[in-house]
Image (cartoon, rainbow, N blue to C red):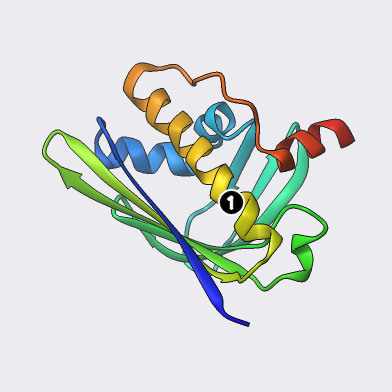
Amino acid sequence: MSRLEFVYVTYIETTPEQLWQALTDGDFTERYWFGHRIASDWTVGSTYRFTKQGVPHSDGKILISDPPRQLAYTFDGCSPESKRECTSRVTFDIEPSGGSVKLTVTHDNLDEGGVTYCEISGGWPMVLSGLKSLLENGNVPSIEPPPTAKRETADA
């Protein structure tokens, strides 16, 4: 089976340090990531965990932690169907670009035709739109959560 990658690039009016904080601070992630809080000590080899309303959602391992330039971690899908897929990887590359920051998110090692690829292809643009809006104007747009997040809310 082939492995796929999903790449998303956006430019955000912020600093690399503020973007790093928004990616790694649970108070920030909860605001733009549909209520999910992330927690870790952000050292290579450590774990991270996403929770929603205190309930564990997903976790993984920190692969790269180079503040405020690059962050990478393993990722296992959230839905029961995606748990059967291979562990994928998410990499955030942060580069200054004038008065803004270029953020490149690469989610790779995805199963071709897999549930995770289908879920993240719609999910990442929603999450990153919320992140951009929050950093630039302090508000998160009113976006309908991705189907996985809706299922979790119904199950909670």
Label count reads 1
Task: Between residue 95 and residue 25, name the one nearer to us.
Answer: 95
Q: Is residue 73 left or right of residue 116?
A: left
Q: Indicate the amino acid at tag 1.
A: Ile
Q: Which residue is labeled 1 in the image?
A: 120
Where disc 1 sits, the SS reads helix
Q: As drawn, is 94 to the left or to the right of 111?
A: left
Please state the horizontal and vertical placement of residue 39, each as a whole percent of the image.
59, 46
Q: Residue at x 68, y 65 (%)?
A: 114
Would you identify the image quadrant in which residue 117 lies? Answer: bottom right
Asked if residue 141 lies left or right of residue 56, the reply is left
Does residue 154 appear in this view? Answer: yes
Q: Quadrant of residue 2?
A: bottom right
Percent x, y for residue 121?
55, 50
Residue lying at 56% horizontally and 36% vertically, measured from the top left: 26
Look at the picture and state if 91 lies above or below 25. below
Q: Which of the image's four quarters has the N terminus? A: bottom right
